[in-house]
């Protein structure tokens, strides 16, 4: 029985925020897997019609239910507000419901935030060559990175990565107004305005058939682009 | 491309104005006053155009457009764009208020629940 090594045991001072919109197929597994490391999970059910909320509750997550569909950005903000209001957690981890993020990456990012005393850890799939997004997706993602960097003055390698660790003081600076997908740029912008220290952390995105089907269709990047420019 | 420069400049400025409207921060009292003045001006111009149709054509000629009716069409196009921009902004504002309201509702419920039924650890 040694002292708990930093990379073992559940992480008690971080809450996972998982926005849900009709994710019931894989959600139970994703939450169960995540809760081995992160016992505290809040799911924001964005008015799903397939019982995702009930699945989340059964898997042991706290649940916030939107009365009607507001979009993923709105759901993220709701989850962050929940963590700030209802808990005294030090870290908020934004996590996807479709199983494309790995729990060990999230845990490593929280550890890194703690060890290096940074307020924000952005997951990036482009820091190493493990993630294989496909050519067209890569081009669009890189375009998104470029625009985000232009708008925020940060130098990120991956902009639309849903895996982030945000310390309480940084999370308090978030007031996302983009309800739909353009929140990914907005979140970076608002975090950059807090002037708090940040790092990028290499993560592996697991593109399964399910996550591909649920994920952003490439044509939707047009919407994201326009929402990003016209506020 | 460089013939009839005057009307082209006027119309382009109009489009730029609409774009600025779209991206600018929320309007205040000053903004509303400007909009009302523009409306009054529009009513006066409309009345003039009805009472003295040749005047419209003269104005059109002056800015380099052949007929008053064409000028009217151009003006309408810009006004329509402005209308689209303004209603888009209003939509966004409403959407925003709606979101905040819905979020507060959802959070009240969830936070209440969390406080009264402590989670098993």
Image: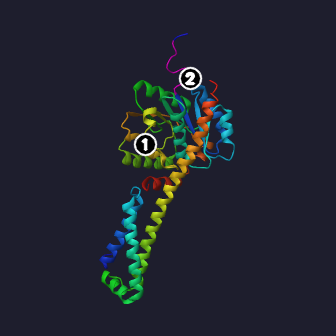
Q: Position of residue B114 (x, y in %)?
A: 61, 32
Residue at image point 42% right, 55% down: A229
In the figure, A5 relative to B95: above or below? above
Q: CA–CA distance between discs 2 and 1?
A: 28 Å
The chain under label 2 reads A
Q: Residues within 10 Å of mark 2 (few under 14, many from 20)?
A: some
Task: Verify whether residue A1 appears in magenta.
Answer: no
Residue at image point 66% right, 35% down: A57
Q: Is residue A88 left or right of residue B1?
A: right
Identify the mark at residue A10; answer none if there is no mark.
2
Q: Are marks 2 and 1 in contact (CB under 8 Å)?
A: no
Tag 2 secondary structure: loop
Check disc 1 and report the residue beneath it.
A188
Provide the major secondary structure of the magenta segment. loop
Q: How is the image coloured?
A: rainbow
Residue A19 visible from this viewpoint: no
Taking depth in this image into account, of B46 and A142 the one nearest to the observer is B46
The chain under label 1 reads A
Residue at image point 51% right, 59% down: B91
Which quadrant of the rendered structure holds the N terminus of chain A?
A: top right
User: For the magenta stretch, what is the residue range?
Assistant: A3-13
Taking depth in this image into account, of A51 and B3 the one nearest to the observer is A51
In the figure, A176 relative to B120: above or below? below
């Amino acid at each position: 029985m040694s002292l708990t090594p930093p990379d073992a045991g559940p992480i008690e001072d971080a809450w996972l925020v998982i926005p849900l919109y009709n994710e019931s197929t894989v959600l139970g597994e994703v939450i169960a897997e995540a809760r081995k490391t992160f016992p505290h999970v809040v799911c924001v059910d964005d008015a799903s019609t397939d019982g995702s909320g009930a699945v989340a509750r059964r898997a042991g997550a706290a649940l916030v239910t939107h009365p009607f569909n507001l979009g993923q950005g709105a759901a993220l903000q709701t989850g962050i507000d929940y963590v700030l209001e209802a808990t005294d957690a030090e870290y908020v981890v934004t996590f996807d419901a479709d199983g494309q993020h790995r729990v060990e990456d999230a845990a490593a990012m929280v550890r890194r935030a703690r060890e290096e005393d940074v307020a924000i850890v952005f997951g990036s799939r482009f820091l190493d060559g493990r993630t294989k997004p496909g050519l067209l997706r890569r081009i669009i993602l890189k375009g998104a990175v470029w625009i985000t960097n232009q708008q925020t003055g940060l130098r990120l390698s991956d902009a639309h990565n849903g895996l982030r660790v945000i310390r309480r003081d940084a999370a308090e600076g978030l007031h996302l107004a983009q309800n739909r997908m353009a929140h990914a740029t907005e979140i970076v912008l608002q975090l950059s305005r807090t002037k708090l220290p940040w790092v990028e952390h290499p993560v592996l995105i697991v593109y399964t058939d399910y996550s591909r089907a649920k994920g952003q269709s490439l044509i939707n990047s047009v919407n994201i682009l326009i929402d990003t420019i016209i506020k | 491309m460089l013939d009839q420069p005057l009307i082209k400049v006027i119309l382009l400025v109009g489009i730029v104005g609409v774009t600025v409207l779209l991206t600018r921060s929320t309007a205040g009292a000053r903004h509303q006053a400007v909009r009302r003045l523009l409306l009054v001006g529009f009513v006066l111009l409309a009345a003039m155009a009805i009472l003295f149709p040749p005047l419209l054509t003269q104005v059109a000629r002056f800015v380099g457009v052949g007929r008053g009716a064409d000028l009217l069409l151009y003006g309408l196009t810009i006004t329509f764009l402005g209308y689209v921009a303004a209603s888009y902004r209003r939509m966004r504002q409403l959407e925003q208020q709606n979101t905040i309201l819905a979020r507060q509702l959802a959070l009240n419920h969830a936070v209440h629940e969390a406080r009264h039924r402590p989670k098993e650890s």
